[in-house]
């Protein structure tokens, strides 16, 4: 979007009615959707809180999400809070659907990173925090489910700091009381800036209470640490701390606002989303500290002059509305029937969960869905000069899992291609291709669940039932010895017959050489016009050799032959060539070749040894490992592995890395495969060809 020329950037202040956008993101099961439900209830956007378990929440309303009890796509909901307009984007938490989160974060003013109070699970935050920090998106860490916390907040904060490059600033300390079973429960909190204590209520705002005496030592220590952290960015505050002067609360609030907006600190708040605990405190922090759209535009390097300019970050296809482009309005507002950059804006829709409400216009800062602007897709902007790619829009990760698809009803095959196109347009981390080597239609994505959701969409939205299987490996075969072969094709069926006679030499070549044809005919024993037919016949046969696979790395030399002046033809010599290889190749010690890939696995360093064992257990050859550049505490393990061992490897990688490990591959070479494994593949190929 850097190509959009403008000067003025719209701003705002709390209570001005300006529109801000906040992402709710975090790992799977951290409680983002329950938090959204409480936010909507606390702001009066809904009259009663729904439940993710009961399937009555505003978020996770898609059939695929309800079926699995987990987020599978972005949920959008807008609210009015104390005179400000807000849109909350509830992101899917699974790493398999994280591209949706990354794409939506690009248009947000701030993010709330929701996490559980469990130190040994903080590694699950790493990919998300890495993305947020690299793009300098202001963010709050909201420690959810604090009512069930079994660890001290101090220990949790230390663990969180290991996966964050920003200074974490604890804004609250919990108030706990003993339980009958000898444990503790969190019943409230102390705000470290105002130094006020509050007791949680099951629903509604917390009650102001007198500061419990037993909390004072912890509160005093935590407040001092908060001020010391803030003083690293403010000399005035530093001087006051050195001189033992109690700083004004207004100075502390200003520092929190400024350092948060500059992405120098990440405040940490506590709560329990499903109980509404801490939700209003979170909303107040967002209201005072979240940057307005002008600051977000500056952060992203966007120049806006007041003309209508929008950015699409998500596409959806729905049966009753067609294509919807989910966009943020950066400037100028938008109205139904308006023309922007040569595109006519039709129906405008304001999403609220699964509901789409028609609206005549959209103001600057809003999230709105545009119906049937077919030319506009995710990662593109639309402004006065037309549609342009967004420079900093996140690229999709390469696929790590694939399935072979086939329509159960052959009449659906044409429909299947169109449906896959729509599904892939909705999610750029999902792809499909026709693999010519194995004659399969492959669906590719970020994991097994990712593709199962896509298959459910095919059935539920497009009424296309498909069968899925593990993709076949594109094996090859070659020869280990050479031979000379004489082949004759002769037919007499009345009238002109068919006659072709050739002598060829077959010999193996070095790996990677492919197929070479050499013409050594002299004296016209095979006329020049028939020689291309010989080469064509050889090439056609090599598509499927004695072991049932394409044949590579051999040379066939045509050095002698005979022809008949009447009966010889191109077809005759083409058939003779096929006979030569049919009879000759079995004499050349054919051997199966399997593709070997160079694999690079990225994982937290404490998982490196398990990744290495995983690789060697799958016939992999370790090449070494090194620190992953730009990822503190992560390694990259390199290896050579057979393609046959890669198919479901991501499942095992994620099981040993708390769901965050990934890998990338590239073809390296073909390698001979012998023994039982080779015999099994040859047998399976024969059965498939006979079916």
Image (cartoon, grey):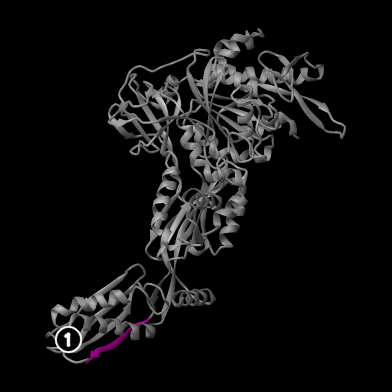
* Residue 280 horizontal/vertical position (percent): 64, 21
Q: Is residue 66 above or below residue 465?
A: above
- Give 413 or 587, whichever is nearer the viewer: 413
- 144 sits to left or right of 134: right
Magenta stretch: dominant secondary structure: strand
- 500 sits to left or right of 603: left
Q: What quarter of the picture does the N terminus occupy? A: top left
- Give 335 or 399, whichever is nearer the viewer: 335
Mark 1, residues whose alpha carbon is within 10 Å: few (<14), some, or many (≥20)? many
Does residue 682 appear anywhere in the picture?
yes
The answer to which quarter of the image holds residue 121 is top right
Q: Is residue 438 above or below residue 428?
A: below
Q: Residue at x 61, y 48 (%)?
A: 657
Tell whether position 296 is magenta. Answer: no
Q: Is residue 634 above or below residue 479?
A: above
* Residue 96 horizontal/vertical position (percent): 53, 46
Does residue 151 appear anywhere in the picture?
no
Q: State the SS at label 1.
A: loop
- 653 sits to left or right of 262: right
Tell whether position 487 is magenta. Answer: yes
- 122 sits to left or right of 547: right
Q: Residue at x 48, y 34 (%)?
A: 104
Which contiguous range is marked in magenta? 481-492
* Residue 305 horizontal/vertical position (percent): 33, 19
Q: Residue at x 59, y 62 (%)?
A: 617
Q: In the image as oriented, which residue stretches furthest toward the front?
A: 320
* Residue 591 horizontal/vertical position (percent): 43, 77
Location of mark 1 (residue): 568
The answer to which quarter of the image holds residue 31 is top right
């Amino acid at each position: 979007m850097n190509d959009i020329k403008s000067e003025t950037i719209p701003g705002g202040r709390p209570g001005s009615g300006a529109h801000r956008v906040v992402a709710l993101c975090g790992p799977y099961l951290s409680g983002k959707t329950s938090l959204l439900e409480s936010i909507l209830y606390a702001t009066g956007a809904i009259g009663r809180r729904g439940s993710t378990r009961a399937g009555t929440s505003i978020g996770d309303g898609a059939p695929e999400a309800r079926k699995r009890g987990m987020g599978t796509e972005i949920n959008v909901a807008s609210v009015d809070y104390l005179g400000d307009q807000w849109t909350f984007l509830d992101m899917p938490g699974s790493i398999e659907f994280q591209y949706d989160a990354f794409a939506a974060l690009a248009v947000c003013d701030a993010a709330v990173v929701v996490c559980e109070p469990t130190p040994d699970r903080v590694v699950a935050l790493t990919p998300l925090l890495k993305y947020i920090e690299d793009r300098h998106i202001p963010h709050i860490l909201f420690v959810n489910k604090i009512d069930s916390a079994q660890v001290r907040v101090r220990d949790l904060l230390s663990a969180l700091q290991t996966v964050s490059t920003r200074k974490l600033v604890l804004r609250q300390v919990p108030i706990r009381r003993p339980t009958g079973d000898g444990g503790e429960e969190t019943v409230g909190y102390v705000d470290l800036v105002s130094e006020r204590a509050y007791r949680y209520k099951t629903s509604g705002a917390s009650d102001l209470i007198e500061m419990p005496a037993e909390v004072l030592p912890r509160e005093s220590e935590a407040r001092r640490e908060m001020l010391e952290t803030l003083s690293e960015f403010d000399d005035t505050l530093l001087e006051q701390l050195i001189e033992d002067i109690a700083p004004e609360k207004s100075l502390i609030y200003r520092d929190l606002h400024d350092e948060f907006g500059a992405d120098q600190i990440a405040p940490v708040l506590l709560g329990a989303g499903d109980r509404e605990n801490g939700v209003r405190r979170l909303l107040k922090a967002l209201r005072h500290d979240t940057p307005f759209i002008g600051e977000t535009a500056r952060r992203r390097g966007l120049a806006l002059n007041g003309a209508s300019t929008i950015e699409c970050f998500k596409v959806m296809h729905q049966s009753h509305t067609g294509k919807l482009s989910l966009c943020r309005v950066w400037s100028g507002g938008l109205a139904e029937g308006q023309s922007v950059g040569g595109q006519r804006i039709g129906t405008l829709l304001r999403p609220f969960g699964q509901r789409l409400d028609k609206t005549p216009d959209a103001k600057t800062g809003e999230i709105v869905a545009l119906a049937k602007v077919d030319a506009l897709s995710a990662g593109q902007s639309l402004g006065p000069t037309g549609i342009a790619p967004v420079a900093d829009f996140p690229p999709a990760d390469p696929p790590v899992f694939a399935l072979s698809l086939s329509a159960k009803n052959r009449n659906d095959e044409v429909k299947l291609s169109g449906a896959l196109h729509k599904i892939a347009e909705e999610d750029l981390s999902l792809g499909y291709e026709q693999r010519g080597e194995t004659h399969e239609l492959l669906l590719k994505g970020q994991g097994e669940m990712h593709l199962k959701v896509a298959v459910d969409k095919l059935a539920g939205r497009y009424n296309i039932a498909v069968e899925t299987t593990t993709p076949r490996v594109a094996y090859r075969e070659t020869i280990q010895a050479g031979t000379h072969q004489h082949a004759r094709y002769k037919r007499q069926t009345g009238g002109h017959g068919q006659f072709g006679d050739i002598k060829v030499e077959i010999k193996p070549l070095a790996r990677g050489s492919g197929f070479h044809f050499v013409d050594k005919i002299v004296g016209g024993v095979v006329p020049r016009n028939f020689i291309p037919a010989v080469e064509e016949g050889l090439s056609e046969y090599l598509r499927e050799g004695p072991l049932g696979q394409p044949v590579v790395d051999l040379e066939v030399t045509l050095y002698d032959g005979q022809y008949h002046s009447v009966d010889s033809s191109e077809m005759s010599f083409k058939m003779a060539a096929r006979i030569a290889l049919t009879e000759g190749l079995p004499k050349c010690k054919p051997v199966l070749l399997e593709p070997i890939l160079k694999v690079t696995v990225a994982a937290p360093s404490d998982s490196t040894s398990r990744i290495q064992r995983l690789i060697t257990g799958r016939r992999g050859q370790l090449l070494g490992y090194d620190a992953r550049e730009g990822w503190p505490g992560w390694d990259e393990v390199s290896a050579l592995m057979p393609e046959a061992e890669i198919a479901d490897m991501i499942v095992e990688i994620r099981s040993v890395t708390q769901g965050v490990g990934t890998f990338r591959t590239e073809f390296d070479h073909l390698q001979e495969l012998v023994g039982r494994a080779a015999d099994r593949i040859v047998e399976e190929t024969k059965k498939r060809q006979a079916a």
